[in-house]
Image (tube, grey):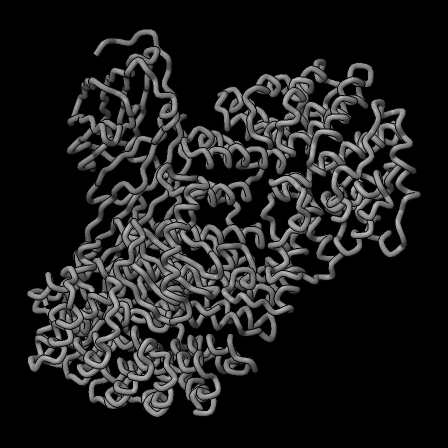
Amino acid sequence: MDSFKPKFFATSTKGENAELLVDLNSEYRDRRKDAVKRVIANMTVGKDVSSLFPQVVKNMQTEDLEMKKLVYLYLMNYAKSNPDLVILAVNTFVKDTDHVNPLIRALAIRTMGCIRVDKILDHLCEPLRKCLGDDNPYVRKTAAICVAKLWDLDQERAIENGFVTMLQDLISDSTPMVVANAVTALAEMQESSATKDVFVVNVAIMNKMLAALNECTEWGQIAILTSLAEYKPLDSKEAENICERVVPRLQHANGSVVLSAIRVIMMYMRYIKSEEFIKGLIKKMSPPLVTLLASAPEVQYVSLRNINLILQKRPDILQNDVRVFFCKYNDPPYVKREKLEIMIKLCNEKNIDQLLSELKEYASEVDVDFVRKAVHAIGRCAIMIDEASERCVNVLLDLINTKVNYVVQEAIIVIKDIFRKYPKRYEAIIPTLCQNLDSLDEPEAKGSLIWIIGEYAERIENADELIENFLETFLEENSQVQLQLLTATVKLFLKKPSQSQEIVHRVLQTATQEIDNPDTRDRAYVYWRLLSTDPQAAKAVVLSEKPPISAESSSNRISPGLMDELINNISTLASVYHKPPTAFMGNKAFSADAVRKAAVADARDEEQITGETMDSPSGGAPAAKNAMADLLDLDFGSSEPAYTSPPISSSKPVSNNGPNYSADLFDMSADMPSNTGVFGGMNNMGGMSGMGGMGGMGGMGGMGGMGGMGGMGGMGGMSNPPAQHPAPAADPFGNLGTFGAPPQQQKPATTQSSTVNDLLDLF
Amino acid sequence: MASAVSAIFILDLKGKVLISRNYRGDIPMSAVEKFLPLVLEAEEDSQAPAPCFTDDGINYLYIRHNNLFLLAITRKNSNATTVMLFLHTIAEVLTEYFKELEEESIRDNFVIIYELLDEMMDFGYPQTTESKILQEYITQDAYKLEVQVRPPMAVTNAVSWRSEGIRYRKNEVFLDVVESVNLLVNANGNVLRSEILGAVKMKVFLSGMPELRLGLNDKVMFESTGRSPTKGKSIEMEDVKFHQCVRLSKFENDRTISFIPPDGEFDLMTYRLNTQVKPLIWVEALVENYTGSRVEYLIRAKAQFKRRSSANNVEIHIPVPEDADSPKFRSGIGSVQYVPEKSCVIWKIKQFQGGKEFSMRAHFGLPSVKNLEDADKRPPMSIKFEIPYFTTSGIQVRYLKIQERSGYAALPWVRYITQNGDYQMRMPDSIKASKMAPI
């Protein structure tokens, strides 16, 4: 072979295929073999050699194993493009499945299964039957997989020929590898079977699998463990027994065997009643999980994503191991990110000091993305652990003093959350924050600082100056910042009316007249109206006490329903993405059922987030989606699954930063107490939908905007062109009439009122 | 749940496919064209791209090996751990076949790579991946194939890692107990993490199908049998992982390590200990910065193990600013070298006896114009060393029993060595000094 090497990838001359054609027909074996190799070499670099099909296939009948393999390889690649000619190969295939050498028998049956052409199928069944019963286990294990190949193309044929039954019998085979491949094939067939009766794991099968488990190759063990998880134990005792048989796998060198065993154990734990036993299992699982961190980085990544899940399900695991997740300087960024997530999950009073000094260290690294995440993590620790919040705040102040731009901005964003969690506790640091006013150029950081100024306006002597300062660029700001400025100004006015009457007037006027963004504009109308109707009510609404955000607030928190599904999928892609398999599986054509299921699961998921906290700016959006889902009765017109089409996308005139800003409507406080005089109680309906409703309610109840509401889920109000809004006169407080009657009296017909109520509940 | 993979590709860093194998035909092979653009896109978003992602219903899982990508694509909710490990296994097997896995060796050996890909995976499911067994029936010496090869029994045997009929004139076993110390110390000198990753590596030259039993001073075993170690202490291993030849259920029952070994070299077991041990080599750094014009380092290294042991080939890597120039060194022992391409100073000490302490001074000039962007990069110091005849954990091989039907006597040889793993110490902040003793 070496002597031919240089030729294989020789640059192509005009008639290379013609040349090959001659060589393929040569009377010399060596020459023919060389030609076949060159054909394969051309195939490898992507040249089209399909025209040589008949000549290559002619060389199939040979005793030279290497040559045979090459021709087979060629066949697999080009059978599809020459389906009619494949028949030329069938005879040799069938003959080869009868060859004295088991290697060739297996090779033939393996390749036949890979040629996905109907003509081959007609001739596959007889040889396959023979091979399934072959004396040689190597042939049998290959034939077992071949049944799955046939099944993939033609289920009926596989059933009619009794292959399913034969495969089921192979589970009792004396050779572990045959058992493993039979299990693999059956598991795959079960998944796509309509009747779901191809592979039902009962006690007998379970015992056979357990028996084969000890002697399989590593990959075979994974297949068996995967199918073992399908079994539903009858009682706690049986679950314990199986777990005991599976636990030794935790010592296997192959990390996938370990994770597959952990999956079985995590699933079986649901059936185990003995707390003691569960404790023992958890103790046994921790060290192997830690050891997975010594694998290759890609495997570490998958493991870390799974550890993240397992920790949420069983917070008692790895409790004392936070140090093992400390990042190494040379860890790849994607590993560092996941380690950081887990560190926060493991954070407690005992390890917080250690963790803080570590996070501070990360905040001085060079990777901007990672640094920001580290700073953010400090904020999350502060919110999680009351006792440590002061230490966290001090670390954040240290970081702000570094004056590194992105560190400062991220720190201010998290400090806003800390202020919301511990109102009034850390006012003393406000001056330090305000010193950095000029360095803020990101909307989220700016918005956060403005929120803080508005919230503490009465304590900040020059609050009006600060706000004034920001207002200079009001029109150029991102809508997120505009909304915050609007709210902060109104707060300032309510707290210090004497200083800021002029400012608030100016802002409201600018926002209603010069801004096209319906959110900003409509919010300005709402405030204006509120202030002009009933300043006391305005106070109650705008300055109402907001519920503190809760500790475990990470936006990637997973609902119990989804969690169970993900635990069932430990080690798979679903567990890496933290999404149900239906969310990313190839099938474009979603069944209505799947969409509904996914939407419900997701809604449940979102509910959890919004129910608990509003700390993240996107917090409000999911609620809106949730509401949308309810309103529309899951009737999604598009082929996209529910959760990928946020309702906002259906209304055009919103700003381009998507769902993010909706949470900021009305001061991010979707969860205000119900003592707000004007608008009654509230729940966590989406800010977005609420806004749409308000636009209609406040300004132009009868203007057709409301009409769309029932169907559009609250979007109708928004799609009105701005021109239809009555322009307020110069003095907002004297201009009540323009705005019509108070909202309560404007409630539309009963069919819509429930929707509107929901929407209004926002306030 | 099926873990099947649709196709496997080996690509160069430009995204060009060097070789590929389509296992299931359910994804057009052209899907690979989107792979690199997607990775680059993720990189641009400053998000470090994860090693697996999904796009348009197709999942991409990949690893980097030298200057290659090994990529698997699938439509299903495949077992990601299996796929990642399988890709690494392909890299290992091909490396064993061709010494070096790189673009050239792939071009030169495409025929055999196709054969291997065909044998190692069927319909997207991993099959035989034991390279020693594969080498018995998939060989490069095509010309020798006049005699027809057959699938080795081992492929499907319960003992799938060893073939029968192996013969040696002299039956010998070499056991290497290698412990790597992972250490992370912060700038204040606090040990953040210290762990020992141990491995028992074997070289087996034994005839027939020998039964081996390995005895260690394993605390759990002593406790469960109620005995106490005859001499010395016993150790507690936090987690043990075994080569697939070891009977795991037997270990779970009575902690005996029994197995039929593969032929030749392999890692019998790895273990992990989290005990806080005194760092074997302790390095302290003092960095003084003279208002940005020059910087001086005082490095002190101490060997904190017994006097009768010594560490060999010690290397202490000290990071220095990227734009440092005109280096000057003075050290009590060993040699010091400035490696500008790595922005570090390497202090090499051939032999470092236990209990000793040495120091080294380094002096650099700094350009007057400061590049602010680089200022923040602060890699840690890293230390390399080997200490022979010594294990940090105190693990000991008590016996290795070898039994074979033919009853030959075989000699086990045992060696111990401790070396550095990820052994890192963070640099302290530089202090602004006004004066310092001249070098």
**Side (left or right) of A735 relative to A553:** right
Which is more toward the observer, B103 or A531?
A531
Which is more toward the observer, A268 or A429?
A429
Question: What x and y, as percent, mark residue A23?
Answer: 11, 75
The residue located at (40%, 38%) in the rendering is B193
Question: What x and y, as percent, mark residue B143?
Answer: 8, 73
The residue located at (44%, 77%) in the rendering is A209
The residue located at (17%, 75%) in the rendering is A66
Question: What x and y, as percent, mark residue B87?
Answer: 33, 59
The residue located at (16%, 64%) in the rendering is A14
Q: Is residue A541 above or below residue A94?
A: above
Residue B261 in sight in this render: no
**Side (left or right) of A272 relative to B90:** right
User: Residue at the top extreme?
Assistant: B435
Image quadrant where residue B85 sits: bottom left
Which is more toward the observer, B109 or A743?
A743
Quadrant of the drawing holding the C terminus of chain B: top left
**Side (left or right) of A92 relative to A308:** left
Residue B436 in sight in this render: yes
Q: How many numbered discs sit on the rendered protein?
A: 0
**Side (left or right) of B199 relative to A545:** left
Which is more toward the observer, B367 or B83?
B367
Question: What x and y, as percent, mark residue A396?
Answer: 55, 26
